[in-house]
Image (cartoon, coloured by chain):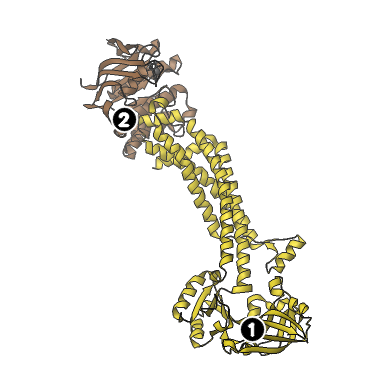
Chain colours: A yellow, B brown
Amino acid sequence: MKTLLTIAWRNLWRKKRRTLITASSVMFATILAIALMSIIEGWKDEMVESIISNTTGHLQIQDVLYHDESSIDHALEYEEEVKQTVAKYGDDIKYTVPRIEGFCLGAKDIGTRGVFLTGILPEKENRMNDLSSRLIKGEMFSADDNYAVIAEGVATQLELSTGDTLVLIGQGFQGMTAAGKYKVGGILEFPLPEQNNTMVYLPLKEAQYFFAAPDRLNRLIMMMEDEREADRLAQQMQNDLDDDWYTVKTWEQLMPDKVAAFEARDAQVKVFVWVLYIVAGFGILGTVITMMHERLREFGILLSIGLKRTQLAIICMLETIFISFIGVITGVVVGFPVIYRLHKNPIPITDDDLKEAIIDFGLEPVFSFSAEPGIFIYQAVTIFLIAIIVGLYPVQKVFRLEMTDSASN
Amino acid sequence: METVIKTNNLSKVYTDTAVPVHALRSVSLEFRQGEFTAIVGPSGSGKTTFLNVVGGLDKPTEGHVIIDGVDIATMKESKLFDFRLRHIGFVFQAYNLIPVLTAIENVSFIMLLQNRPKAEMEERAKQMLEQVGLSDKLNVRPAKLSGGQQQRVAVARALASKPDFVLADEPTANLDTESAFNLLDIMAKLNKEENITLIFSTHDQRVIERARRVITLVDGAVDKDETFNREN
Ligand SMILES: Nc1ncnc2c1ncn2[C@@H]1O[C@H](COP(=O)(O)OP(=O)(O)O)[C@@H](O)[C@H]1O
Ligand SMILES: [Mg+2]
């Protein structure tokens, strides 16, 4: 076997330039593919982070029925069982963010408008998504205040400003009427219209009182130390909680359409990457075919003097694998430091319109790159597969080679 | 002396041509241990076909090739590979050597495929290269050797593993006169010293007289089979 390795390795360097050109085509394909996957992954990481901090958190405990029917009646009771379970996994959970929420009617004088009322603990929200930074007027309430902070769109449509009074009418827990008058203490601006035109915030306690649901929550959001542990933790917490009442959901379960969208794009990128590799694969194949045909006589003689077909096939396969790996390894060696630097220092986006749109979206205005090892491993595995497929060409040739055709003079 | 190869009514007809070609017609020959034989005849007379069939590289249309009591004409390919490796040495007209291996690695190659012990192998390879006058070229690759030197390495390789016999198809065809004589002298010397049966083909009058037995083929049939008493 060592001899076969030696022969295969040395064969590569018989035509140095050709080998290097082939290996570089693989190298460039690898670098391109890595860059492409890295930027898409980086973008996805940003999006996921934005979804997690702006919307779902890592995990949520909800009433079993709430996800399918978002009614205030399906608010969970924030009682000992839940508190203890959360405390039990204190090592995994960084902090929790409780919310109670529901649609209701906002009114001022004769104007009315559907709004989405959310009761929050402001310091928790600030930790999660820096809510107070969206203030354009007034200030954020603290947990014990009893005034409201509303989105800018709501303020415009109801002609409300700070100091004015907002009337809220809705449905409370188990059919109770919910009604209240609140002073507007602050106005927030959201980039997404559906938020900007509907959001109304009250301190958690005040909102629970409004909904006639003291100690109840619609979601207990949990932010984790390590988001990769989300599935495991959800499973464990679910086991500890009574599943007739409580359900623990990961952000992926809460946002299935987003997950599907990411998967669809991953698939697109993979198709692109495979196209790159197929191009590189044909490059290797061309070289392999040439290497094969210029050595048919040599092969015939090797087989005549006693080298087995399998041994010759191994030599050919090794040559293909070597060329491919020289390409992929140099590609990774060149690509990794570059990607790693870009990962640490993302490229700022300079186009002003684009920049603004991205900031509004709650994302950083940069092209961020992912340096996940998986990206690099994926290249190695894919190239290996392609090398094997390409390597099958000389292998099947070797098994069909007629010794007299190639060895005789 | 013991018979090493015996062919029985060997015939070979190529039918993939426009007109069927009778490359061998009923060739019955015996080769004994230690013989040094030239197969001669004009181009197309069947020399290569004969050596290929005897070497198990090609199947006869009819007849038998008995080596060591076995008929290799009916042997399965997988078995033949092993049989050739253990019993037969080959020297071809050109492209004999593995270009990426040095002279000594080339000479060791067959022994390596036979899984011989490393030390024995190296010693034998050195000894053989010395015998063919190339002890100063052990670590040189074929491209750096002259045509004659390359053929000498090929002869050293064929004999190094001590096969039952060596077949050489026009080993001198690409060589100048001096190198051709030199190669034949070395082959004759090794034939004597190692007592290995050697059969080579040639259409080159210059080298025929080095052989002790000369078999002439005409149109695939044995025309003459002469033995000479020569001191090489
Ligand atoms: N593979 C083949 N297919 C068809 N005809 C062949 C083949 N090999 C050899 N021949 C024919 O068989 C005859 C003998 O050829 P060969 O043994 O090569 O002769 P020599 O080696 O003496 O020149 C020639 O007529 C040649 O054309
Ligand atoms: Mg010939």
Q: Position of residue B106 (x, y in %)?
A: 40, 32
User: How busy is the neighbourhood of tag 2: few (under 14 within 10 Å), some, or many (20 plus)?
Assistant: many
Q: Is residue B188 visible?
A: no
User: How busy is the neighbourhood of tag 1: few (under 14 within 10 Å), some, or many (20 plus)?
Assistant: many
Residue at x 65% of width, y 59% of height: A342
As drawn, is B26 to the left or to the right of B205?
left
Find the distance from the CA under tag 2 to the CA under tag 1: 88 Å
Q: The disc numbered 1 marks a residue on which chain?
A: A
Q: Secondary structure at mark 2?
A: helix
The answer to whether marks 2 and 1 mark residues whose Cβ atoms lie closer than 8 Å is: no
Question: Label 2 amino acid?
Answer: Arg
Which disc is residue A119 wearing?
Answer: 1
Quarter that holds the C terminus of chain B: top left
Per the image, the residue denoted by label 2 is B84
Q: Position of residue B175 (x, y in %)?
A: 45, 18
Residue at x 42% of width, y 29% of height: B97
As drawn, is B19 to the left or to the right of A72?
left
Q: Position of residue B60 (x, y in %)?
A: 30, 22
Q: Secondary structure at mark 1?
A: strand
- Whether the residue carrying mark 2 lies under 8 Å from ligand 1 is answered with no
Q: The disc numbered 2 marks a residue on which chain?
A: B
Quarter that holds the N terminus of chain B: top left
